[in-house]
Image (tube, grey):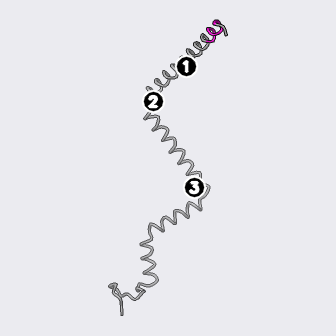
Amino acid sequence: MSESSDAASLAEARDLREQAWALVKHDISGLREGIGERPIGRRIKDAAAEEVVEAIDTAREVASEHKAIVAGTMLALAAWVLRGPIGSVLHGFFGGEERGGHDEEGQDSD
């Protein structure tokens, strides 16, 4: 290669580098302006709020498509939460006597 072709390729590379650096500077100034208008914390908060709204919409859609499953799940949860009172009612309804050889004070009846 000759010196003139080397100089031409160096000049071309320098021009490309300067163009790329100008693009980087432009992007950085755009980011700074964007952050000045809407800080990062606010962007995160907005993105999280959008995700929550999207999740609620998806949950509503799934619940409307599968009403029987949702109702069964709610019934099972209610029964589990109220298992103590339900057990007491059923115990009283089917007989209040203790089984297993214990008297009312919890002593063995021999």
As drawn, which residue projects farthest toward the bottom? 110
Check the image and report above or below for 55 versus 107. Answer: above
Looking at the image, residue 106 sits to the left or right of residue 7; the answer is left
Mark 1–mark 3 distance (CA, rounded to whole Å)? 49 Å
Looking at the rendered structure, the secondary structure element under dot 2 is loop
Residue 85 in picture, x, y percent from top left: 42, 72
Tag 2 residue: 38
Earlier residue among tags 2 and 1: 1
Q: Are marks 2 and 1 in contact (CB under 8 Å)?
A: no
Nearest-to-viewer mark from 3 and 2: 2
Amino acid type, label 3? Ala
Region in magenta: 3-9
| Circle on res. 10 | none
Question: In the image, what residue occupies the spot 34% across and 84% down?
Answer: 106
Tag in front: 2 or 1: 1
The secondary structure type at the circle numbered 3 is helix
Q: Residues within 10 Å of mark 2 (few under 14, many from 20)?
A: few
Query: Which disc, if any, is residue 23?
Result: 1
How far, Cα to Cα, is label 3 from label 2? 36 Å
Tell me, yes or no, whether the highlighted magenta stretch contains residue 8. yes
